């Protein structure tokens, strides 16, 4: 099933890049728009990765893959929403995601230790996984 998902993702990406209209003259690499795309890709990956690591039992690798998919899906959707599809905007999104991956990995020092919160009527117990 995973292989099918990856195959569909690759084919869809190729179709997007080959069937989209030519870029306009105002779509420059040094435009303010690219910085916003870079920041959006970075932020979407970081927030998605943090959410997945804190609130699910998904491991690091799968959390990164899922967060990358979420961030790039939002970027591609935004390009379809725009009047002109821009490869350069997608590259800026991808650069932001690529910058976020090592930073999120470095900040995720706890690796598999998670904080669990147990609630009862009278007490709140906070502990690390495996230690109560």
Image: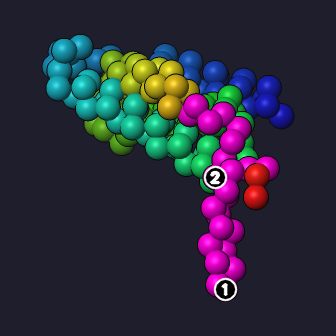
Q: Which residue is depicted at the point 28% across and 36% down?
A: 83
Can residue 2 be seen in this snapshot? Answer: yes
Residue 1 pos. (x, y %)? 83, 34
Residue at horizontal 65 percent and vertical 67 percent from the top? 125
Mark 2 element type: strand
Instruction: Give left or right: position of 60 versus 49.
Output: right
Quadrant hosting residue 119: bottom right
Residue visible at 17% across and 26% down? 32
State left or right for residue 78 relative to residue 117: left
Left-right relation of 110 to 40: right
Q: How is the image coloured?
A: rainbow
Res 121 label: 1
Question: Bounds of the magenta span?
Answer: 108-130
The part of the image, by quadrant, that contains residue 95 is top left
Q: CA distance from mark 2 to mark 1?
A: 20 Å
Residue that label 2 marks: 115
Magenta span contains residue 112: yes
**Observer-nearest of 45 and 120:** 120
Please name the residue shown 63% across and 31% down the image. Answer: 65
Residue 80 located within the stretch drawn in magenta: no
| Residue 90 in view, yes or no | no
Query: What is the quadrant of the C terminus in the image?
Result: bottom right
């Amino acid at each position: 099933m995973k292989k099918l998902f990856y195959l569909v993702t690759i084919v869809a990406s190729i179709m997007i890049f080959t069937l989209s209209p030519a870029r306009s003259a105002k779509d420059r690499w040094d435009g303010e728009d690219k910085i916003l795309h870079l920041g959006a890709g970075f932020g979407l990956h970081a927030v998605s990765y943090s959410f997945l690591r804190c609130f699910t039992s998904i491991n690091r690798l799968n959390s990164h893959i899922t967060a990358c998919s979420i961030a790039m899906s939002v970027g591609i959707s935004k390009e379809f929403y725009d009047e002109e599809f821009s490869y350069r905007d997608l590259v800026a999104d991808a650069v932001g995601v690529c910058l976020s991956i090592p930073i999120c990995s470095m900040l995720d020092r706890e690796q598999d230790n998670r904080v669990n919160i147990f609630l009862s009527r009278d007490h709140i117990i906070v502990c690390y996984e495996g230690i109560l």
